[in-house]
Image (cartoon, coloured by chain):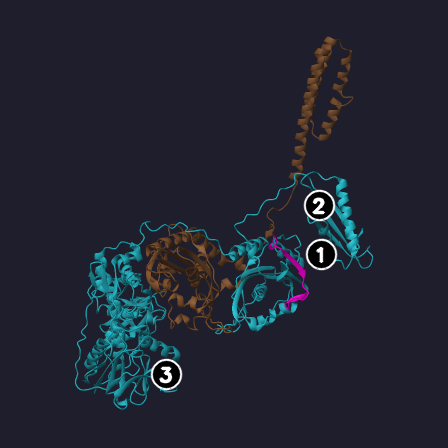
């Protein structure tokens, strides 16, 4: 009896293992599962006969049949997962879409190219320890000219160069021609050390053309302390230029003249386009150098005018045009582009 | 200032290439704007005539040209297209030198060419550039050497001289500067004083020190005013000055040579035998040699004879006494006029001449005699004549103050250790009177260097000659770590946050000029008396400082719509201006405009919503989230806004700006035909709430689940959402709810509308029970029923 049952068990195992393997659909598999493990399934029926066995035979046959039940259940689960996966994959395989159709476009807002250029310069200078300072755009002549050692008859004070306010209660209000007034205020207000930058708009009565604009932006810097020298200026501005153009950047200093600095210099950077190798380079016009900024040791008269003793303190100052640098680095050929606000340009940055 | 290489050689023994010289000029702070080659830099090129033109047997594009030369016929191969029988051309014979190239015999495609027909380019004659071969004047004789038609080969440097260095506005001055740098002696020219015989005019200087500190005059009689010699004409032409006659040319020549302006008068036209340097009388008139009659005032310095002004001192000569070809007797002036006097006259009368530019920047008072001597020498050599004694009126001799300093002070300014010996050497070369006694050094600037007054000026000279490249070659300077912590100005950081929000919402940043027109002011309804006006506007439409950003932004919309871009969202954060009690004031403003479709994501298959009022309202709420802001429907909208679609932006209950739809008529004023929505507000008062250094504090989030309940209500049409909002918030400030539907129309009684609100309930302490939530909903419903006559739908 027990041997007969054992034979039945093994043939059942063989039979269903094979059938489960070859089941093609979930339906087939379900039917098979009912046929084997359902209430009237073959294995269930077999187990029912357990009750007629002797206690000893029950001990032998019981675990054997349970093992088979677990095994078959596992096989059914495994097969079900496989068949389900196959069905999903078959469904996915039918998908037919053109992945190359245009995607969603996102209207990403952008900062103005001038702001981008200015931020870059300010970031570098901030790392060099300069602090952003501000002042009014409508200045008085005292801050814009007098304190800066600019003589009364200097051409910069002409109506050809400077915008004057017409309807204020008193004369002498001008649209600042540089941000130097900010430096003057800083020196009048605060004792050295002073290490500031003054970025912002300035105004000059220049007709608008490809390279001139009556409104433009400047960044000026000022450092006043004990023992500040021309060498410090050169060192700091060289680092600044390397910050802008990479550590390979070469910097050249040459003498110049400004009423508010002495010695005065102009600072050139080796043309980043042709590296000074192309005599027909449109950027440096074949000179190999591009003028970047004006600078110098603060003129003792300026320090005196601002209440700082030039025998005790010294300083350096520099100033540069943001537009010029932005044009150079962003490949913008016409300064008017900045103020046209053509969205086809603005979207590019 | 143009500088001729050949002229420099009068003063310096140099044989530098133009490129090397350019480097030296740059080192010395003279920017080289342009280098041009002039004259003929070739030999062995002669005039010939085209006798016959034949096709080259082996090349389609070449011709065989037979030429008539002084030596008979010659045949050359030529590729030019502008060959014309009978034309005279420039033939470079074999062995000719063109620049650095020597022409070798050539066989071109099997035919020997006995030379080359030259183009202007090949001859380096850039000024006579024409395409193809250069065609000569018909009158030139065959065999004439071409180089004789042009000046000698030369290089012209166009230097930019800074305004503090008038001493560099001459060949001598530039040579002097180079001589220090290159350590070469300056060759002195022969300016031997010319004694002369007999008296000249009496000279009076009533204008005094402020007008004319020195005046030298002399008469030269019986001169023959011919054409000036060729070498002088060539130099003047290269300088860009047209030769006129010997006397005029000589004064110009001296100017370019040693930098001192001179003036020559026709002696016969001067009345009553005296020269007065005086201030003009008010209303006195003067006819300049440019043919323009000018009315003078008491700030104008004039040279007058006994009766009338005969020249504007140092600026312009007079017509009546100008030198003509037939002038026989002259009075020659070499004077020093005070810079401010010349500056005023030149500026007031709008005249700028070679002379005025030098005098207003400062001429060399000690160079008057040299200029007089050189001019006298040249005049007598070229025009002959009898020279009088000079009359030199120089009441107070110029004595520049010595700068006393210690050598260490120079090094301290520069931040470098230059040896004392080197410093001494530089100073000695600059000023012969330099004295170095122990530690106190005394430098007396030469009379032509009035710009040097303090040791800082000397420091600049030193580093220029010593070399900027020697500066800061190591890192041994002062410490450059930050000296103290400084915050950005608040408006800067605040603006950054505004801009970041707006760009994340799809806005592009614009930057506009600060100038606007009367039309803009009127369009905004601003009062003119409160608007800053420019006295000297650059152009029409730029007369006022903008009191708001909106006009500029509307112009940006118009511009871009014109470029067929219709979905636009732009903002600007800039200053605006006003006149307050007569004083200019300025503050930052944030403005935005939007039109067309809403920005953000676009997909070709998805419908894009047009911008509406609620969009721009959402933008403003987003920017100003976190501030005590209230948006209130405007009782009286500004003229440029839609009267019904406009809200006031209130900060602490005070209006700081508006948002809404731009009035269609205002939009039309700017050429905009579509709907435009806009916002603009002053950010000044927001700054005080803004603190970049204070971090936001995180709030605990509830660990218990929240529940939502929707409530649909029927309300009177007249009830506004803000009334609903206020009523609910009165129950509890923490109630969280959102409007999810608004319905008006069918299935509702006349004069009613329905809204659906979604409430969210949560607690930090526990999960709320249904009972608790139902109670809350009941309370809300009861309140709304009482206050707004709401019923459950």
Instruction: Quadrant for residue B312, please give it.
Output: bottom left
Nearest to N terminus: mark 2 or mark 1: 1
Q: Taking B613 as reference, is B474 left or right?
A: left
Q: Chain of mark 2?
A: B
Nearest to N terminus: mark 1 or mark 3: 3
Q: Chain of mark 1?
A: B
How many residues crowd mark 3 within 10 Å: few (<14), some (14–19), many (20+)?
Answer: some
- Chain B is shown in which shade? cyan
Residue designated by label 1: B722
Residue designated by label 3: B298
Where residue A11 appears, as percent x and y from the top left, is 70, 16
Camera-nearest residue between B285 and B94? B285
Camera-nearest residue between A206 and B430? B430
Q: Quadrant of the N terminus of chain B?
A: bottom left
- On whether residue A247 falls in the magenta region, the answer is no
Magenta residues span B623-643
Instruction: Quadrant for residue A228, please give it.
Output: bottom left
Real-space CA distance between mark 2 and mark 3, rounded to the nearest whole angstrom: 86 Å
Tell me the SS state at disc 1.
helix
Q: Taking B760 as reference, is B499 left or right?
A: left
Residue designated by label 2: B760
């Amino acid at each position: 009896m027990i041997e007969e049952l054992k034979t039945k068990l093994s043939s059942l195992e063989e039979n269903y293992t094979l059938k489960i393997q070859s089941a093609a659909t979930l339906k087939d598999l379900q039917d098979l599962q009912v046929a084997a493990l359902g209430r009237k399934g073959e294995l269930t029926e077999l187990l029912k006969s357990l009750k007629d066995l002797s206690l000893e035979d029950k001990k032998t046959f019981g675990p054997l049949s349970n093992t088979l039940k677990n095994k078959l259940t596992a096989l059914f689960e495994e097969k079900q997962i496989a068949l389900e996966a196959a069905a999903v994959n078959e469904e996915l395989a039918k998908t037919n879409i053109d992945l190359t159709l245009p995607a969603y476009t996102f209207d990403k807002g952008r900062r103005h190219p001038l702001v981008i250029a200015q931020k870059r310069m300010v970031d570098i200078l901030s790392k060099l320890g300069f602090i952003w300072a501000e002042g009014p755009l409508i200045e008085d002549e005292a801050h814009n000219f007098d304190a800066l050692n600019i003589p009364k008859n200097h051409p910069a004070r002409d109506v050809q160069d400077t915008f004057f306010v017409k309807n204020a209660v008193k004369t002498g209000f001008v649209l600042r021609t540089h941000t130097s007034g900010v430096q003057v205020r800083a020196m009048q207000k605060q004792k050295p050390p002073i290490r500031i930058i003054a970025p912002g708009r300035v105004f000059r009565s220049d007709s608008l053309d490809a390279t001139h604009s009556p409104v433009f932006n400047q960044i000026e810097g000022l450092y006043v302390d004990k023992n500040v020298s021309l060498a410090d200026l050169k060192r700091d501005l060289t680092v600044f230029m390397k910050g802008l153009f990479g550590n390979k950047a070469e910097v050249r200093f040459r003498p110049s003249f400004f009423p508010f600095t002495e010695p005065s210099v102009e600072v050139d950077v080796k043309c980043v386009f042709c590296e000074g190798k192309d005599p027909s380079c449109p950027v440096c016009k074949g000179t190999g150098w591009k003028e970047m900024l004006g600078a110098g040791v603060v003129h003792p008269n300026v320090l005196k005018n601002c209440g700082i003793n030039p025998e005790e303190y010294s300083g350096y100052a520099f100033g540069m045009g943001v537009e010029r640098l932005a044009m150079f680095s962003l490949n913008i050929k016409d300064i008017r582009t900045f103020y046209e606000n053509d969205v086809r340009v603005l979207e590019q940055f | 200032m143009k500088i001729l290489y050949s002229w420099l050689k009068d003063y310096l023994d140099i044989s530098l290439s133009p490129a090397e010289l350019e480097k030296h000029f740059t080192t010395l702070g003279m920017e080289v704007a342009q280098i041009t080659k002039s004259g003929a830099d070739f030999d062995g090129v002669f005039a010939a005539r085209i006798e016959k033109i034949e096709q080259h047997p082996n090349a389609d594009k070449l011709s065989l040209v037979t030429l008539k030369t002084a030596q008979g016929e010659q045949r050359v191969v030529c590729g030019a297209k502008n060959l014309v029988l009978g034309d005279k051309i420039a033939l470079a014979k074999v062995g000719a030198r063109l620049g650095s190239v020597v022409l070798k015999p050539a066989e071109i495609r099997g035919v020997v060419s006995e030379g080359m027909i030259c183009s202007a380019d090949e001859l380096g004659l850039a000024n006579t550039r024409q395409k193809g071969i250069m065609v000569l004047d018909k009158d030139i004789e065959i065999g004439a050497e071409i180089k004789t038609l042009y000046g000698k080969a030369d290089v012209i440097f166009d230097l930019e001289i800074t305004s503090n260095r008038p001493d560099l506005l001459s060949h001598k001055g530039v040579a002097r500067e180079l001589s220090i740098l290159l350590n070469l002696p300056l060759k002195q020219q022969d300016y031997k004083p010319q004694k002369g015989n007999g008296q000249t005019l009496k000279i009076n200087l009533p204008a005094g020190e402020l007008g004319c500190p020195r005046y030298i005059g002399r008469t030269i009689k019986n001169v023959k005013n011919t054409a000036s010699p060729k070498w002088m004409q060539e130099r003047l032409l290269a300088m860009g000055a047209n030769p006129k006659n010997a006397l005029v040319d000589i004064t110009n020549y001296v100017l370019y040579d040693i930098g001192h302006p001179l003036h020559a008068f026709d002696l016969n036209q001067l009345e009553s035998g005296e020269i007065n340097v005086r201030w003009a009388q008010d209303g006195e008139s003067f006819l300049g040699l440019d043919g323009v009659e000018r009315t003078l005032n008491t700030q104008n310095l004039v040279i007058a004879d006994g009766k009338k002004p005969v020249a504007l001192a140092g600026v312009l000569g007079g017509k009546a006494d100008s030198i003509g070809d037939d002038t026989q007797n002259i009075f020659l002036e070499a004077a020093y006029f005070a810079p401010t006097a010349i500056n005023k006259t030149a500026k007031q009368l709008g005249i700028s001449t070679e002379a005025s530019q030098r005098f207003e920047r400062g001429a060399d008072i000690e160079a008057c005699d040299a200029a007089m001597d050189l001019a006298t020498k040249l005049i007598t050599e070229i025009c002959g004549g009898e020279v009088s004694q000079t009359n030199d009126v120089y009441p107070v001799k110029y004595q520049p103050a010595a700068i006393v300093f210690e050598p260490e002070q120079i090094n301290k300014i520069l931040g470098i250790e230059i040896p004392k010996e080197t410093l001494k050497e530089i100073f000695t070369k600059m000023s012969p009177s330099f004295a170095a006694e122990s530690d106190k050094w005394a430098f007396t600037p030469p009379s032509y260097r009035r710009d040097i007054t303090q040791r800082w000026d000397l420091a600049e000279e030193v580093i220029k000659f010593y070399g900027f490249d020697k500066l800061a070659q190591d890192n041994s300077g002062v410490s450059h770590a930050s000296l103290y912590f400084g915050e950005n100005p608040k408006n800067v950081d605040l603006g950054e946050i505004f801009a970041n929000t707006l760009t994340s919402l799809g806005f592009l940043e614009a930057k506009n000029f600060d100038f606007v027109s009367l039309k803009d002011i009127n369009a905004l309804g601003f009062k003119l008396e409160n608007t800053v006006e420019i006295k000297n506007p650059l152009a029409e439409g730029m007369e006022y400082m903008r009191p708001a950003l909106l006009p500029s932004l509307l112009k940006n919309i118009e511009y871009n719509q014109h470029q067929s871009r219709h979905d636009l969202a732009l903002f600007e954060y800039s200053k605006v201006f006003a006149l307050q009690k007569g004083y200019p004031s300025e503050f930052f403003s944030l403005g935005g405009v939007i039109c067309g479709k809403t920005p953000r994501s676009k997909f070709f298959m998805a419908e894009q919503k047009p911008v509406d009022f609620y969009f721009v309202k959402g933008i403003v709420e987003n920017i100003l989230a976190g501030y005590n802001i209230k948006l209130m429907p405007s009782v009286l909208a500004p003229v440029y806004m839609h009267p019904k679609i406009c809200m006031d932006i209130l900060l602490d209950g005070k209006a700081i700006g508006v948002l809404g739809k731009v009035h269609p008529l205002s939009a039309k004023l700017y050429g905009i035909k579509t709907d435009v929505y806009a916002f603009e507000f002053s950010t000044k008062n927001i700054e005080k709430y803004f603190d970049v250094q204070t971090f936001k504090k995180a709030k605990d989030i509830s660990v218990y689940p929240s529940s939502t309940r929707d409530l649909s209500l029927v309300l009177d049409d007249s009830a506004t959402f803000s009334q609903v909002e206020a009523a609910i918030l009165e129950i509890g400030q923490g109630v969280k709810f959102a409007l999810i539907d608004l319905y008006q129309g069918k299935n509702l009684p006349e004069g009613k509308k329905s809204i659906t609100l979604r409430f969210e309930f949560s607690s930090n302490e526990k999960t709320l029970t249904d009972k608790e939530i139902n109670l809350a909903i009941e309370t809300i419903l009861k309140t709304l029923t009482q206050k707004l006559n709401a019923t459950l739908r």
